[in-house]
Amino acid sequence: MTSNLDPDARNSYRLLTLAARMVQRRQDDALAPLGLTRAAVIALEGLADGPLNQEQLAEVVHVQSQTLGRVLLRLEGTGHITRTRQTVDRRQFRVELTEAGAAALAAAGQAEIRAYPQDPAIGWKVLHEELAKLVGSLPSPRPGTAVVPFPEHDDRRARHAGDHAPKLHGVDNLDNWRG
C-alpha cells in the first residue's frame, strides 16, 4: 500500500511525536522532586479558580470522572486538596485546593518553566498557531465531540453557566498523560 501523504507532513508527524515525548519526559523530571505528576498538576490547575464538584472538574480538565477520582485520592492524601461530601447530594464531593495545593501548583509552574528551553530562535507563537491548526484538523474520536485545543482560562466560567465542553481529542484519560 502506498501513501499519498506529503513526506514533509509524515516527517513532521514523527518529529511532533518525538517532541511530545521529550517535553513530557522533561515535565515528569521537573515535577518528580515535588511529588507531582502531570495529571496531578492538571487537576490542581482545574481548581485554581475555586472549588468544583468532581464531575465539574472532570469536565474542565477533559477526563472521565472515574479517572479523575484516582488522581484526587492521591492529591487528598498529600494534603493538596480537600474533598467534602455535599449535604444535598451525598454522592457528590466538593473538591477544593488547599494552601499546600496552591503552593504545589505554583512550584510546579516554576519547575515546568525551568524545564522548557529558553531558545529565542524558537518561534513559539508560530509553533502554537501551527499546532492549533493541526489539532483542529484532526477528526473527532467519537461522533458528537469536537477536537479543541486547551481552553483559555476564562473558558471555564462559560462551562459553569451550563455549556458543555467537548472532550479533548486523545486526552480522555489522565493516566495516559504520565507518559
Image (cartoon, grey):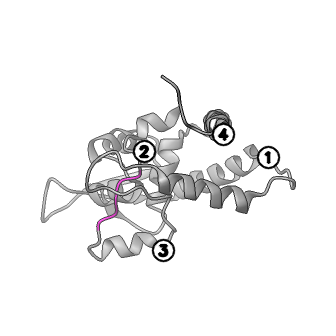
Q: Are marks 1 and 3 in contact (CB under 8 Å)?
A: no
Q: Magenta includes 85?
A: no
The residue wearing badge 3 is 154
Q: CA distance from mark 3 to mark 4?
A: 32 Å
For the stretch drawn in magenta, the main secondary structure is loop
Q: Is residue 37 left or right of residue 76?
A: right
124 is higher (above) or lower (below) than 138:
below
The residue wearing badge 2 is 171
Label 4, secondary structure: give it. helix
Q: Are marks 3 and 4 in contact (CB under 8 Å)?
A: no
Residue 117 numbered mark, or none: 1
Q: CA distance from mark 2 to mark 1?
A: 24 Å
> Toward the viewer: 109 or 122?
122
Q: Are marks 2 and 1 in contact (CB under 8 Å)?
A: no
Q: Residue at x 70, y 53 (%)?
A: 110
Range drawn in magenta:
164-168
151 is higher (above) or lower (below) than 121:
below
Q: Position of residue 85 (x, y in %)?
A: 22, 56
Q: Residue furthest top?
A: 1
- Residue type at mark 3: give it: Asp
Between disc 2 and disc 1, whose residue precedes?
1
- Residue type at mark 4: give it: Ser
2 is higher (above) or lower (below) than 115:
above
Nearest-to-viewer mark from 3 and 4: 4
Between disc 2 and disc 4, whose residue precedes?
4
Between disc 3 and disc 4, whose residue precedes?
4
Residue 164 in which image quadrant: bottom left
Nearest-to-viewer mark from 4 and 1: 4
The residue wearing badge 4 is 12
Q: Residue at x 78, y 57 (%)?
A: 123
Between disc 4 and disc 1, whose residue precedes?
4
- Residue type at mark 1: give it: Pro
